[in-house]
């Protein structure tokens, strides 16, 4: 997949709007955090992570005064893999152990 440069993205996005096609540019996280709308809506949250570091994330753009949202940092890579294999896929402990032994998980 080839990513468009900012200039290409703006040009292609403008062309899509002219033809009434939904489109948008791909932004990296630095661009998302620097976006004036992201800053104005105060959408950047900093949360403690289990790694001991603080992570910067973008919160939901929806704000409900009567239903506040609680944010938490994402899990570490593979943190819930065994649990998901058991609970979501219904694998037995023996099946999960077999996957671990073969290096699949």
Image (spheres, rainbow, N blue to C red):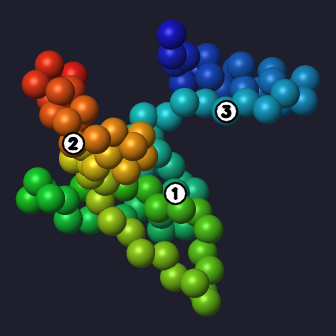
Give the CA distance from mark 2 to mark 3.
45 Å
For numbered disc 1, what is the local secondary structure? helix
Label 3: how many residues lie within 10 Å, few (<14), some (14-19) or many (20+)? few
Give the CA distance from mark 1 to mark 2.
45 Å
Task: Give left or right: position of 21 versus 25.
Answer: right
In the depicted structure, whether residue 42 falls above or below residue 16: below
Tag shown at residue 90: none
> Counting residues from the N terminus, which is met first, the one under dot 2 or under dot 3?
3
> Counting residues from the N terminus, which is met first, the one under dot 1 or under dot 2?
1
For numbered disc 2, what is the local secondary structure? helix
Check contact, mark 2 vs mark 3: CB within 8 A: no
Front-lying residue, 89 or 40? 89
Task: Give left or right: position of 98 versus 68.
Answer: left
Q: Position of residue 100 (x, y in %)?
A: 15, 29
Q: Position of residue 93 (x, y in %)?
A: 21, 42
Judge whether residue 67 can be spotted in this image. Answer: yes
> Counting residues from the N terminus, which is met first, the one under dot 1 or under dot 3?
3
Q: Which residue is mark 3?
A: 24
In the depicted structure, whether residue 15 falls above or below residue 69: above
Q: Which residue is mark 1?
A: 38
């Amino acid at each position: 997949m080839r990513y468009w440069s900012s200039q290409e993205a703006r040009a292609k996005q403008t062309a899509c709007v002219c033809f009434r096609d939904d489109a948008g540019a791909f932004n990296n996280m630095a661009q998302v955090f620097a976006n004036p709308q992201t800053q104005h809506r105060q959408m950047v949250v900093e949360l403690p992570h289990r790694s001991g570091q603080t992570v910067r994330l973008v919160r939901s753009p929806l704000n409900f005064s009567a239903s506040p949202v609680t944010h938490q940092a994402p899990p570490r890579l593979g943190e819930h893999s065994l649990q998901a294999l058991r609970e979501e896929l219904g694998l037995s402990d023996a099946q999960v152990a077999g996957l671990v032994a073969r290096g699949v998980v």
